[in-house]
Image: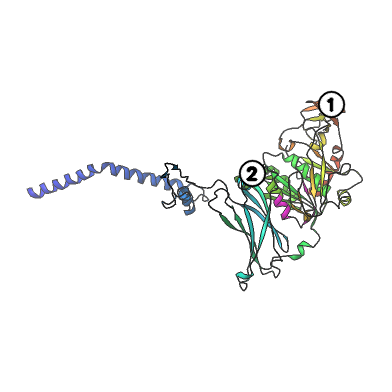
Amino acid sequence: MGKERSGGEKQKRMVVGVVCNFAAELKLLLTALLLLCTLVTLLQFVPSRFTISASDLRFCISPIAASPSPSLSDTQSDDLLSSGILRRAFHPYGAAAYNFITMGTYRGGPNSFAIVGLASKPLHLYSRPAYQCQWLPSNSKQNNTNITSSLAYKILPDWGYGRVYTVVVVNCTFSHPVNLDNSGGTLLLHASTSGGGDSKFNLTDTIPALTEPPGTFNLSLFTSKPKYDYLYCGSSLYGTLSPQRVREWIVYHVRLFGERSHFVIHDAGGVHEEVLEVLKPWMELGYVSLQDIREQERFDGYYHNQFLVVNDCLHRYKFMAKWIFFFDVDEYIFVPPKTTLGSVLDSLSDYSQITIEQMPMSNKLCHSVDAAKRHRRWGFEKLVYRDVKRGIRRDRKYAIQPRNVYATGVHMSQNLGAGAKTTHKTEGRIKYFHYHGTIAQRREPCRNLVNSTDINFENNPFVLDTTLRDLAGSVKKFELKMIGSRLYNTRQ
């Protein structure tokens, strides 16, 4: 009994010793279990849309895997030559900019395509990158010998305004029509750096620019009457826009452009919920298309990639409109009384491009007659003073017949087809009133009330001009007729 009792005491002392020796580890284990249980409990109260997937975990570790160290065989080191000269080595890592970023690819005809995108500006400024197009038929009976290829030429339409990226329109013209049998196929763009960035390598990226599924090629698109008489290609909208100013602008131009018109709005962050409510009635009626282009903000180009957006719009709707207009949402197109937009453009139909004269309006001066009612007046109804300072070159906006244009800009196109003409002599026939900056103001624009037909304000001469004010009543009646009173309570 004494031996058994002493043996049991030894076992108890052994267990206590083990526990004491591993006390720290046990505390850590218990703490970890407690935290795990707490986390599991908390996750029960997190919304179901919150999940942690394998892709999320891959994203977490991707920075580690994305930039692997060069292999020892590729890594050079400084070398001391027999002549005593130390030859230094350079070690490149990563990439400063993408070779090419596509936004859209469109048919230009039975045998031509236009690829609209961004590319590294230094690459185009200091090197000679090259492009080649290739058509791969879907028909499995056609082998590689039937694949046609085309040398492509590039257009840089942003007038050198690009930043990290510049806009590139690549024109692919094949020696004969492709996909005439409507069996489908894929257009490949081979974009080569031609040694730009690193003269040791001529890197080429093969990009699937466009896929035409079988039965989708419509040859009649290039010869049929356009769906729209007039189409508006809007620049990138950004910032905190005024819903009321957008409301006024869209109804004014739908009335002016007529039933066979369409407006393409590009949202670069400016179409917030209140602006969307203003656009919805016109979207429902088929007058407005809204494109979310906020993703382009990833790529550092000029002015929210404005040149990219207008070129994509040109080629996307090239065969769907007789005329395409390019101007901003604080600008109002005007044609004189007793004329229509149609009659004016018919008189200018010999030109592929017309530019439009600017009428700069004050964004602060209002007439004192509107003092009591200015909060109920529309912007173009109460901002009635025009800047008449002479000797200033003012920007013009423009309209084009798109089938004769290969690329475009913000204030005009410099890439018209052979034989296409431009005229700037449109004074007296068409002009635009510019209320600079009012679209981004969410406050009452009337800062100064004036009781005069002319005034010198901030060192500029202004005169009273009620041209658009006189149209306000008709525009408001048109809105009521088209969409009712659903926008009556729109805020500044």
Query: Dot 2 surroundings within 10 Å: few (below 14), some, or many (20 or more)?
Result: many
For the residues labelled 1 and 2, say whether their Cβ atoms are less than 8 Å apart: no
Residue under pointer 2: 301
Whether the magenta-drawn stretch holds residue 326 is answered as yes
Q: Is residue 233 magenta?
A: no
Colour pattern of the rendering: rainbow
Amino acid at pointer 1: Ile
Residue indicated by mark 1: 455
Relative side of 158 to 359, left or right:
left
Which range of residues does the magenta coloring cover? 311-328
**Left or right relative to 305: residue 449:** right
**Which image quadrant is residue 467 in?**
top right
Residue found at x 63% / y 56%: 131
Residue 268, position as x, y percentages in the image: 66, 45
- The furthest residue to the front: 83
> Which residue is nearer to you in this view: 289 or 421?
421
